[in-house]
Amino acid sequence: MLNENDINARLTPNDALFNNIYIIQQKFNIVPNKNSHYGASIDYQDISELRNEFLTELYNSIVDWVYSSDKYKELREAAMKMGRSEAAAHAEVQRKAHEKFRGNHTVEELLMQGQLGELLLFHFIQRCQKAVPLLRKMKITTSAHHERFGADAIHFKYENCKPLIILGEAKTYTSKYKFNEAFENAVNSILTTYKNHKEELSLYVHEDFLDKDMNEIAEAYLNNTLDDVEIHLVSIIVYDETTKLNITNKSDIRNQIEEIIKKRYENFDNTKIDIEHNAILNRITYIVFPVWKLEELVRDFQNKL
């Protein structure tokens, strides 16, 4: 079975993407009350939002979401055997990945499915949780013979030699003034995912949806032979922010964004996070990601596809 070094070697490099994202990690006024929740937003360079740079790097990373590094190499080598150069082979694999991501979806369908949020979730779990994909959900989504997997992400890591399964949910809301509704929906949704994930995961063991070397981990988890395993949850809420920013300088803009995120956490009704009856919520990490003109951002992303 893969060890901790093997897992760490599989993490997707994503510095180029996160160079365009401002991240805050602290104890927000939310339950569970811990230091591991996040706020994030598209960053600024001086007084210019790095919106296009963010979208470009997110677009470039689609191939990492769709294919594991081993599968990417296999497809690239197959393309080269057909007489393509290495650069042309890479372009071919990237084209296939983008087709899988886009499918036949309209902009409105992409908005509804929240695939941009799921792509961000994929990167945040690897960046902040240091956990690699156990299951490639995009393969299931694009398969005509399988039902859609409930979790938006299922990742794996070791922490102090303890195996951890990370279940992730992404919620993307373009509606204005609906943050509290979005947050409550995100909590309820990930609880449903937690309750059903083992039954759903069992459908995909020994199929092409799990990376070959990760299949052993998934099987051990399902058979209760993965000693001392824990389940943790991650929920990212990408929403349309309407508070006007005062565009002055980078430091001040960041401070304004931080205050907006703090207030969003603070104004949520903690009684709607029922930890008393759902102990697993003690292990949830929230990521609140405001975007100004979110629908426009998703449309710009679609145009890149």
Image (cartoon, rainbow, N blue to C red):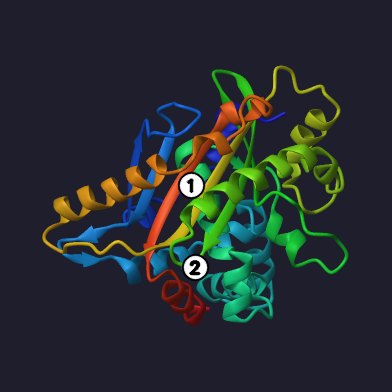
Q: Amino acid at mark 2?
A: Ser
Can residue 192 be seen in the rendering of this structure?
A: yes
Residue located beneath label 2 in the image: 175
Residue neighbourhood size for the residue with mark 1, other residues' Cα within 10 Å, grouped as few (<14), some (14–19), many (≥20): some
Q: Secondary structure at mark 1?
A: helix
Q: In the rendered image, which quarter is residue 128 located in?
A: top left
Between 126 and 7, the one lying in front of the other is: 126
**Nearer mark to the viewer, of 1 and 2:** 2
Q: Residues under labels 1 and 2: Cα distance?
A: 23 Å
Q: Which mark is residue 229?
A: none
Residue 275, relative to residue 293: is it above or below?
above
Question: Nearest the camera: 158 or 6?
Answer: 158
Where does the image place residue 243, in percent across and percent down from the top left? Answer: 30, 61
The circle on residue 124 is: 1
Query: What percent of the width, then of the height, locates residue 265?
Result: 41, 42
Q: Is residue 74 above or below residue 9?
A: below
Q: Residue at x 80, y 54 (%)?
A: 208
* Crowd tier of the residue under label 2, counting other residues whose Cα lies within 10 Å: few below 14, some 14–19, many 20 or above: few
On the question of residue 130 being in view, the answer is no
Q: Position of residue 108 (x, y in %)?
A: 59, 78
Q: Position of residue 79 (x, y in %)?
A: 66, 72
Report whether 8 appears left or right of 254. Answer: right
User: First in sequence: mark 1 or mark 2?
Assistant: 1
Q: Amino acid at mark 1?
A: Phe
